[in-house]
Amino acid sequence: MSDRVAIIGVGFTSLQPSTPHLSFKELMFEAAQKAYLDAGIQPSEIDSFVTCAEDLNEGLSIFDEYTPDQLGAVQKPMHTLTQDGLHGIADALMQIRSGIAELVVVEAHSKASNIKTPEWLVDYALDPVYNRPLGLNPHALAGLEMNVFLHETGIRAEHCAQVVAKNRSNALRNPVAAYPLALTPMYVESSTYVSYPLREAEIAERVDGCAVVVLADEKKALKAQSKPAWVCGVGFANDSGTLESRDWVRADYARIAVERAYRQASIQNPREEIRLFEVDDTYAYKELQHLIALGLFSDGAELGRSIEAGETKADGKMPVNVSGGALGMGLPLEASGLYRIVELVLQLRGQAGARQLPDVRLGLAQSWRGVPTTSGAVVILGTERPNEPA
Amino acid sequence: MSRRKVAVVGAGMTKFMRRALETPKELAWLAAKSALDSAEMKLDQIDCVVLGSAPDAFDGLHMKGEYLSDGCGGWKKPYLRCYVGGGTGVYAVAQAWFQVASGLFDTALVVCEEKMSSCLPHPQAAFLTIFDHITEQPLKPNLLWIFALEQTRYMQTYGIALEDIARVSVKNKRNALGHPAAQLGADLTIKEVLASEVMAWPVHRLMVSPTSDGAAAVVLAAEETARRICDRPAWIQGVGWCLDTAYWTNRDLAYPEYVEKAAWMAYRTAGIREPRKEINIAEPYDPFAYKELHHLEGLQLAPKGQAPRLLADGVFERNGDLPVTPSGGLLGVGNPIAAAGLMKICELFWQLRGEAGTRQVPGKPERGVAQAWGDLMQVGTVVVMGTKEPA
Amino acid sequence: MKSEPEPNLVRGTPLHEKPLRQGKTFTITYTPKLRYEWDMGQAIGRYLAELKEGRLIARACRKCERVMIPPRMFCERCFRPTDEWVYLKDTGKIFTFSLCYVSWNVKRLKQPEVPAVIEIDGASPGMGILHVVKRIAPKKVRIGMAVQAVWKPKPERIGSVTDIAYWEPIKK
Amino acid sequence: MAQLPTKNEQRSWPGKIPLTSLYTVGTGGQIFFHALKTQGKLIGTRCNPCEQVYLPARSFCERCFAELTEQVEVKRTGRLVSYTISYVDHDGARLRRPTALGLVQLEGATTLILHYLLSVDDSTEVKIGCRVETVIKPKAKRIGSILDIEGFRVVS
């Protein structure tokens, strides 16, 4: 039984627009082998496994059937969450703190390239009575949200374009990223509208990949071969599942999730205390909406000034998405959050190569599950064993 | 803070129906509201919400957990949807148990919902897509195949007669006659069960649970809260779950090892050494008649191959030595997949509190076990509940 | 505390087919367009390629000494890569079977299909695949019966499990 | 170790989810669509403690879980909360004529409603905050669907 929980190993494949040489099982096997090697453990030592997956992203019903073999989880406790990998981290933490497990593995992957009708699939997630009959391309929901977000906060389209330029440029220094590109905001502003005011270049492209994360209780973490990344805070929340009554300006799911995470991590002033932020940027404006929801900026005006001053760039005062984010790395569906965790762990360990930031002691990862959802999670990791358990 | 004791303090469910007027959200709300009412609690006293629901293909919604969130009470709350196929209904309680036991949350609302009637041409058709997409789906299998293949193996290995399996249908459908939510309660004879048409030999129609729409819900609370708000909490004494290989055609199907492992995980926590002596009431998963027997053996409540004999001897009747499926089970009450599993937890709650009305088993049961099963005959999920606080 | 739910407290509105047909109940019918092209990967890619050639192939793990079919690039027991490809015979034994009178979309069949798990000769004991048995009176099918693959003619084979048309009993 | 497939080998397996879905509109939906179809009215339900009027009518309040029985007729006019102009279809192809969509708060409702913005082809023709009016199809064409509403028209 342990109150403190740490990440002691990560394994991941590079992110690719397609991975035709590997089945999803083979992709998972690769990431799992790397994670167990990194953690210095055998799968027989693992008490419990969590996969984050959605049936119809896989094209298989009851997908959890196909999860145990390639992770070494046969005849072990294993379950699926139909949520982002960060929800999986929260789940693992709760298992360990309840005393039911000491070593838990969280897996999430994407074979997005195998989905031949991705927009039709998202369409199938819309309310069948009130929304789906309109026959709208689901990106239109992002267009609607972006428009009212810009209108209410005073954030401008140029700021969104700067997010794209920043994140894709950051990805140049991340070897796993699928969409690195040195580009200027001009490039984004000349891209075509998908759903006004949302432009094509502001939408993260789906990619394939798999990430596996090993979490351990305090006793095991202190004996681990790598420097543990302590879980200092977790939070997850939903707003309404109904479009008609959810909040369209504020990302309330992120605000509720982060409040819990900050409380657990005893963080009073996140901007000063947290060194790097890996924030959902499925659409460029989402990064900005999320930064406000995370309490890092009081309003759009302050955020706008900060962007103009370059503060969220890799060499700025508060780097956001040094990994390249979803715009630069690509969007590996449920694995999105775990790739952000991977980035935090590498940065905390000082293993982030060309994009290593100096003096990283605390980092935050945040996820959102895409349209039409209002589901998100937050995880805060640190190098120091927390005084108060998360 | 470390592990805390957790109890079920409220339970509720909808009718189980062939086709419901209500939307999936409304079904979830009806059950959740009923569970909250039974605990005399309001939604704002709930710290987190756990949804259990089986394939999205039934309700006809991609990411159906996200769609269902407001129906489950997840509005601006921590909300998760957990999933282990047919094992989900019982697993969801294990999920909520560790969420509360961890100290992160004081109360949890667990909701399981399924609206299978949304699926055309027939809900069973959705099951084609549970098979391996490349090595099995081209053969156009259906769900009956795997059940029948497993039942054949079970019968052959232990020399079990079909009459002994039909007896499960008779018992459970009769037990369901007293259940206000039941879809298929009936007073039948073994002969009538065997006279129903063969679906997939050795499986006859009356040995198969129906497809259903419905929802069930329970409220969990940490020890201090449970003692404060509830006069007779049903304590969760142990939880267990286990997932076997997906390569089901490589496995011995006669005995569910994954159920045994899940059961021992739960029994260890509950401090149970001799399950047959220490458990008063069982709600094993019975989507098909033979599965109840199979699972009783996996749960260590009958020796391998001996469950049929104990059933014939009357041990598992409502007034028997070990009442099994007094609710009426999936065969009698209905089978809206995840909701059916959670219905078994609801039944234990009512039975342990002496509130099961005409279904009440005699002798004031002190401890019960509920179990569900799923995937490609692969998942065992187990919850042990009792009137005594766990040590 | 309320006691066990009264019948009227267990809510829900069963809907019968008649009001549905009469249009008193509003409904929406929708057919999703959900298409996939699943990557076969190394193990299943080779498996299907060999089926096209009329051969069954398995993977072996040197550590647990199992020969596994369907093949996989990892051993789920040892959690290590499997080591080599092994050709198997196209004969085997019925491990379990059913006589199924219902199609996948729940249409009644006059003649039952005989789905079976077939333990393949040359693979480790208990290693079977799902397939169908034909050319035998359903009542005569037994566990342990020796069967042989009946392949589709070569030009009709596409690299699929259905390149084996069915399995039939081996005549003695 | 593994042999990579040769160039001519098939590497992917095509398939689909071969289903159709039949949805009921539910007890809340029955109220809304019945009024819309037979009377051309927009009916919501009120939750007094939460100060919410849900449109379309719902059977329960998502905030407090109360059963909602008080029906409220909502006005056809309202305010445009947001809009978008969608240029692509579900297959990613450019639409010949873009679709304008509006998120509208009708007077008397606290929730929003999503529908088409009629006669809008260009973002310059419309502003957030402008007044809109709900256009409902003639009775003969109404079937009890969200498409019984034609959309919203900007009121100048």
Image (cartoon, rainbow, N blue to C red):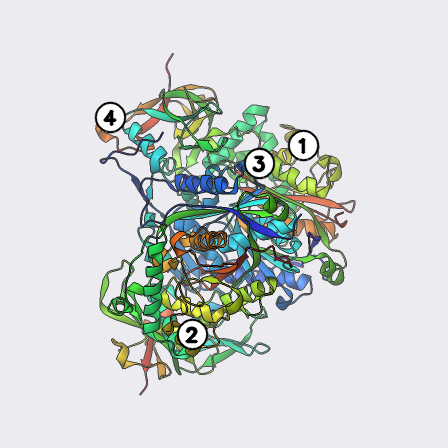
Q: Residue B287: x percent and y percent?
A: 55, 42
Determine the chain carrying the residue at label 1.
B
Which mark is in front, 3 or 1? Answer: 3
Looking at the rendered structure, whether the residues under marks 1 and 2 are on a common chain is answered as: no
Residue B258 - label: 3
- Judge from the rendering whether residue C49 lies leftward or rightward of residue D35; answer left or right: left
What distance separates the C-alpha of mark 3 from that of mark 4? 41 Å
What distance separates the C-alpha of mark 4 from that of mark 1? 50 Å
Q: Amino acid at mark 2?
A: Leu
What distance separates the C-alpha of mark 2 from that of mark 3? 53 Å
Query: The residue tagged with tag 2: helix, strand or loop?
Result: helix
User: Can you identify the residue that label 4 sits on?
Assistant: C153
Q: Quick one: label 3 or label 1, which is nearer the N terminus?
A: 3
Q: Residue B369: x percent and y percent?
A: 67, 43
Q: Amino acid at mark 3?
A: Tyr
Q: Amino acid at mark 4?
A: Pro
Quadrant for the C terminus of chain D, please: bottom left
